[in-house]
Image (cartoon, rainbow, N blue to C red):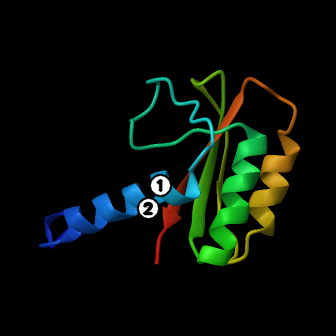
Amino acid sequence: MPACDRPGSQVKFDEEHRFLREVVYAGLGDLNTGFDSPLIGHFSPEDFLVVIDRCEPLHVRIIGIEVFAAGRDLLEVKISPEDEYEWARRLAQRYQGRSYVTLCATFCVP
């Protein structure tokens, strides 16, 4: 049975989404202006470094990151090679100072 068809899976998904919005993304500028699902937060490389810094002590695992230019052109996709956060920091740092770049991620919320 797919996870989305299991009882309670929608509730868990909603709770995780709310946690990300209210805790991990709190006070940051979501740059998703409608070019992606409203459930997906897009952030500048600088704000994404804050996201990473918040995820680490909360044990929110970053599964993968997508990098976009101007909200439409996919530049890069990285899947976590490890359970640490340094790979994500290196990726975000590589795009710092590029105002046209946004980053979004898939997370595993404990």
In the visual, does 89 lie left or right of 52? Answer: right
Compared with residue 37, is residue 99 higher up or lower down, i.e. above or below?
above
Q: Residue at x 63, y 67 (%)?
A: 55
Q: Residue at x 57, y 65 (%)?
A: 63
Q: Which mark is residue 19?
A: 2
Three-letter code for the amino acid on which mark 2 is drawn? Phe
Compared with residue 68, is residue 45 higher up or lower down, i.e. above or below?
below
Three-letter code for the amino acid on which mark 1 is drawn? Glu
- Which residue matches tag 1? 22
The reply to whether discs 2 and 1 touch (Cβ–Cβ < 8 Å) is: yes
Q: Residue at x 78, y 43 (%)?
A: 46
Q: Nearer the viewer, residue 56 or 85?
A: 56
Residue 24, percent from left and from top? 57, 58
Residue 76, percent from left and from top? 69, 42
Compared with residue 81, is residue 52 higher up or lower down, i.e. above or below?
above
In the visual, does 4 lie left or right of 45? Answer: left
Instruction: Find residue 58 and report its image quarter.
Output: bottom right
